[in-house]
Each structure stands twice: as C-alpha cells, then as structure tokens.
Amino acid sequence: MAVMAKWRNKTFEVSRKKVNPLKNFSTSTTIKGDDSKSKKKKTELVPFTFDIDVHANAGVNPQKEYESWCSLIKSTGVLYMHGRRFGRETRLKEVSLSGVIMDDYGRIRFATIGLTFEEVNKKETSGKSGARAAASEAKKAEKKAAKKKGKKVTISVGSSVKLTGSYYADGEKILNSEKKRVLKVGKINGNKAYLPQVDGWVYISTLSLVS
C-alpha cells in the first residue's frame, strides 16, 4: 500500500483495495493586508486545495465518499504528506463534486472531489486548552467510576468501545458522528488508548466498553 497523504482519518492512497490519489495540489503564501483577520505577523492564513478522483471500481463509493467529506466541513486537522506534517492545523472550508459519470441505474461510478482548506488562526487553536479539558474530563470520569459498586470494567487491546468524552487526549474535539461509531482499541499506553479508525488517542476512562 502506498499512502500519499493523510488528513484526520482520511487517507489518499494507491493500493490493491483502494485507489484515490491526491492530485492538483495548490497552495500560496501572501503578505498580510491591512484588513487581515490573520493573527500571524507577516502573512495571511495559508490556504490549500487539491482534488481526489474516486472510482467505484477501485474500492471507493463516490457518493458516500463525497457525503463523508461534507460531514467534515468546519473540522480541523493537520495534513501529512509522505508521513511528514505539511504546514499548520487547517480547517476544511469547501467540498465540491465534478466530472460525475453515472451508470444506467443512476449510480455514480466516477467523480472528482475538490477540497479547500485554510490555516486555523493561532488564537482559534484550542489544542492546549482542549488537552487540559480532556485531562480534567478523564479525572472526573475516573472518580465517578470509583464511586460505582460492582465489577470493574477492563478495556484492553482489541476491545470494542464507544467514545463518551468531548476531547481526544491531544485536545482535538470529538465529533458527534464519531461518538456513534463502535471502535476497536489498537494500543494501550498507560491511561490512554489508541483508536486507529479515528487515528486518535483518548483517555481510557472516557471510553464505554461495548464488548
């Protein structure tokens, strides 16, 4: 599998099971204007755009993939290209659909999804405060669990769980759609668990065991 890039839990790759490569990547850095909303000293907030082609015959359902991206509008994350971080934290601003090819039954077989991102203002970035909130949330959950009588619930690698907290351990907000999913624990490190399906670490005390 060759993963070209990644943003949140979205990967752009070329493999035997999935083909959705990133293309037409574009970005720019410009001098800050007088009426700028950017909190950076010299430049405007950096935008970038790129497209992905999605083929029904290449392991990707074009309509579902488009709807999935639309649900992430306003979400923030960091773009990784070739395993390396590209720029600062960004927010998904716009999702477009073009070049649609349908079959005789009206099913979308091919389409190009256009994605537009913009750098998040430093002032808006709440990673540190979010991380503190996540730690505080975990402590409260631990105290609440300690007061309950009965058999202690043990979460381990391979456990099926649901997210019950509001933040990942790094301070990023947990989306409501992610709380509805049943996830598998991939790793355990101290009082934190890694969930590969959402590519995030959470405090174990903020997880609900499903099985």
Image (cartoon, rainbow, N blue to C red):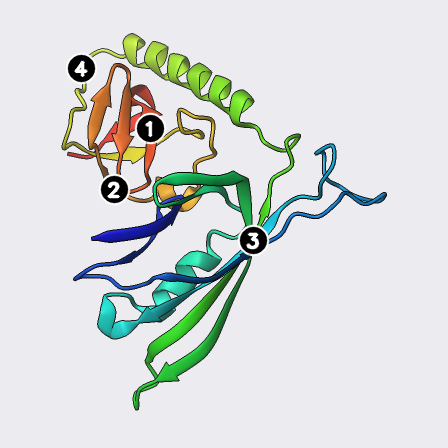
* Residue corresponding to mark 3: 48
* Residue corresponding to mark 4: 152
- In terms of sequence position, does the residue under pointer 1 or pointer 2 come before the other? 2
**Residue type, label 2:** Val
Tell us which disc is closer to us: 1 or 4: 1
State left or right for residue 155 relative to residue 117.
Answer: left
Foreground residue among 157 and 32: 32
Marks 1 and 2, how far apart at CA = 15 Å
Q: Position of residue 57 (x, y in %)?
A: 23, 74
**Residue type, label 1:** Trp
Residue farthest bottom in this picture? 104
Tell us which disc is closer to us: 3 or 2: 3
What residue is rendered at 51% in x and 45% in y? 75
At mark 3, the secondary structure is strand
Tell us which disc is closer to us: 4 or 2: 2
Numbered badge on residue 182: 2
- In terms of sequence position, does the residue under pointer 1 or pointer 4 come before the other? 4
**Residue type, label 3:** Phe
Marks 1 and 3, how far apart at CA = 27 Å
Near mark 3 (Cα within 10 A), the count class, few <14, some 14-19 or many ≥20, is some
Numbered badge on residue 201: 1
What residue is rendered at 31% in x and 87% in y? 103
At mark 4, the secondary structure is loop
Marks 1 and 4, how far apart at CA = 22 Å
State left or right for residue 144 relative to residue 44.
Answer: left
Marks 4 and 2, how far apart at CA = 21 Å
Near mark 1 (Cα within 10 A), the count class, few <14, some 14-19 or many ≥20, is many
What residue is rendered at 27% in x and 64% in y? 19
